[in-house]
Image (cartoon, helix red, strand yellow):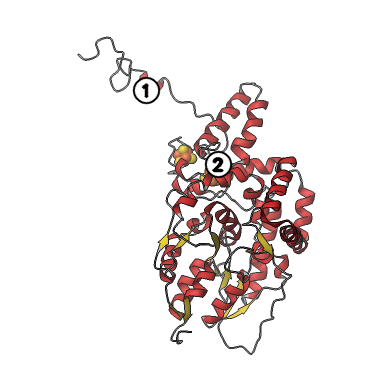
């Protein structure tokens, strides 16, 4: 009666065509088994750091499907693939937050890592770095020493200006220096385990970033993370022991995110073996100070003897009952890393922060910071886009906490306050149970 000529949504809901259910179907060409189940619902889009900058996970899948369909039809896809390299592959943080929202469990980051693997042609370099990891960490320290020296000579403004020019001239290959850049750590001299020490033992796995990168020069916390963490663990009554050859260990994440799966797996297995030995066959718990590394070590872990904890889980399960807390008045900003979310420790991190500070700020709408290990250096626009609302959200805070040193670099730069590890805050706000206040 309302639409006698059938112009409103023809054939939708009411149709006279008995075959309508077989017509005008949305094309869903097979593209890759990782994403073939995608129903293009878009639930994954709000958490993606490249949403609004380049592509969302759904759009990455839709365009990859289109490329594959065109290829099968014999259409030249060179230009669209060239564009996809930046919009689809380069600007994906590959931290897989999309998988948490996806009703069919698709991690678009897995597809991106697979595509990076096809482009990864520096196998010789990756093998060398995997075999000489301590030298690579030492190289990072050296680069930070150079940047630190230049900062002392040229000052903050001068170095920032020169570095911006170098980054532009090198088309992004030389990372941009910012005042949030870490200072270098000295080579580590770690104490050996004392067999006569009767305190319970904890194996401390300091991630490569914690072994190379110290606090930023302007940060109020100037102690290395290793020292702050040791002090916290010892305060709770633990004897801290380190795995043998710590300098050579790596969870494999830097290799995996670049598409070098074989080297990544080799380093992960090496580290698991070293941890098994250091923990006396799994007798002692293992504290890993960086959430992304913890996640990689516990993923697909077949050996149930290893008990690997990220800072949040270790503090909540092993330290809370051994410490008394005195919350600080100054508000604190909390950044929950993607890995903390994957590990299921997001709420626990906020709860721990609430024991340490009377006011805790968790910025809304920031899910993944987009730094992604080194993307903050090589594709800084992803980090800047993802954290574009951070400064306003944390303006009442003087400091922020997180559990990943590299994420903290971008958070400090874009938030305008210094972010550092959770261990600093807990160490500052706690004392041994029953001890009298200092
Ligand atoms: S892995 Fe991260 S950056 Fe990549 S598509 Fe998923 S949410 Fe977006
Ligand atoms: S949430 Fe999953 S199914 Fe929906 S669009 Fe994203 S990847 Fe596809």
Callouts 2 and 1 close, C-beta under 8 Å:
no
| Mark 1 neighbour class, 10 Å CA radius: few under 14, some 14 to 19, many 20 or more | few
Task: State the residue in front, 28 or 210.
Answer: 210
Q: In whole angstroms, how far apart are the C-alphas of marks 2 and 1? A: 28 Å
Residue at figure coordinates x 57%, y 60% from the top left: 404
Q: In which quarter of the image is the N terminus?
A: top left
In the figure, residue 129 lies in which quadrant?
bottom right
Whether residue 250 appears in this view of the structure is no
Between marks 2 and 1 in the image, the one whose residue lies nearer the viewer? 2
Residue 293, by quadrant, is: bottom right
Q: Where is residue 8 in the image (x, y as percent from the top left)?
A: 30, 17
Q: Is mark 1 within 8 Å of ligand 2?
A: no
Residue 232 badge: none
Q: Which of 316 and 369 is in front in this view?
A: 369
Give left or right: position of 11 versus 73: left
The front one of 29 and 86 is 86
Residue 412, percent from left and from top: 56, 56
* Residue occupying image coordinates x 63% and y 68%: 206
In the rendered image, the vertical position of residue 357 relative to residue 34, given as above or below: below
Residue 93 image point, x, y percent: 58, 46
Left or right: residue 260 versus residue 417 is right
Label 2 CB sits under 8 Å from any ligand 2 atom: no
Q: Is mark 1 on a helix, strand or loop?
A: helix
User: Which residue occupies the extreme bottom position in the image?
Assistant: 196
Give the residue at mark 1.
Answer: 21
What is the tally of numbered marks visible in this picture? 2
* Sequence-wise first label, 2 or 1: 1
Q: Mark 2 points at which residue?
A: 34
Classify mark 2: residues with Cα within 10 Å, few (<14), some (14-19) or many (20+): some
- Residue at the image position 39 percent from the left and 68 percent from the top: 358
């Amino acid at each position: 009666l309302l639409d006698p000529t059938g112009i409103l949504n023809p054939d939708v809901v009411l149709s006279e065509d008995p075959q309508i259910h077989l017509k005008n179907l949305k094309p869903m060409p097979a593209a890759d088994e990782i994403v073939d189940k995608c129903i293009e619902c878009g639930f994954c889009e709000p958490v993606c750091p490249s949403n609004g900058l380049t592509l969302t996970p759904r759009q990455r899948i839709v365009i990859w499907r289109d490329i594959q369909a065109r290829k099968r039809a014999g259409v030249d896809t060179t230009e669209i693939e060239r564009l996809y390299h930046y919009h689809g592959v380069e600007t994906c943080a590959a931290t897989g937050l999309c998988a948490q929202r996806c009703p069919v469990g698709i991690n678009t980051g897995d597809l991106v890592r697979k595509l990076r693997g096809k482009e990864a042609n520096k196998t010789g370099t990756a093998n060398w770095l995997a075999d000489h990891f301590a030298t690579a960490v030492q190289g990072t320290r050296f680069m930070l020493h150079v940047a630190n020296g230049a900062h002392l000579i040229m000052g903050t403004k001068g170095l920032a200006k020169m570095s911006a020019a170098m980054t532009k001239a090198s088309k992004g290959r030389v990372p941009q220096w910012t005042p949030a850049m870490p200072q270098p750590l000295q080579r580590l001299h770690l104490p050996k385990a004392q067999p006569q020490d009767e305190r319970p033992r904890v194996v401390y796995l300091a991630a490569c970033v914690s072994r190379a990168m110290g606090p930023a020069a302007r940060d109020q916390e100037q102690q290395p993370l290793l020292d702050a963490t040791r002090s916290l663990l010892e305060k709770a009554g633990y004897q801290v022991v380190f795995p043998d050859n710590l300098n050579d260990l790596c969870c494999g994440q830097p290799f995996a995110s670049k598409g070098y799966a074989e080297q990544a797996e080799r380093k992960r297995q090496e580290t698991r073996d070293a941890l098994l030995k250091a923990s006396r066959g799994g007798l002692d718990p293992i504290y890993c100070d960086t959430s992304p590394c913890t996640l990689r070590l516990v993923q697909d872990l077949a050996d149930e003897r290893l008990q690997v904890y990220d800072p949040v889980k270790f503090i909540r399960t092993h330290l809370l009952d051994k410490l008394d807390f005195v919350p600080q008045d100054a508000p604190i900003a909390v950044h929950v890393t993607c890995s903390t979310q994957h590990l299921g420790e997001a709420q626990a991190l906020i709860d721990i922060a609430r024991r340490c500070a009377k006011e805790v700020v968790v910025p809304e709408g920031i899910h993944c910071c987009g730094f992604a290990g080194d993307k903050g250096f090589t594709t800084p626009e992803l980090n800047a886009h993802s954290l574009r609302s951070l400064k306003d959200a944390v303006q009442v805070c003087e400091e922020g906490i997180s559990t990943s040193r590299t994420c903290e670099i971008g958070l400090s730069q874009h938030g305008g306050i210094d972010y550092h590890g959770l261990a600093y805050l807990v160490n500052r706000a706690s004392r041994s149970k029953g001890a009298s206040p200092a």
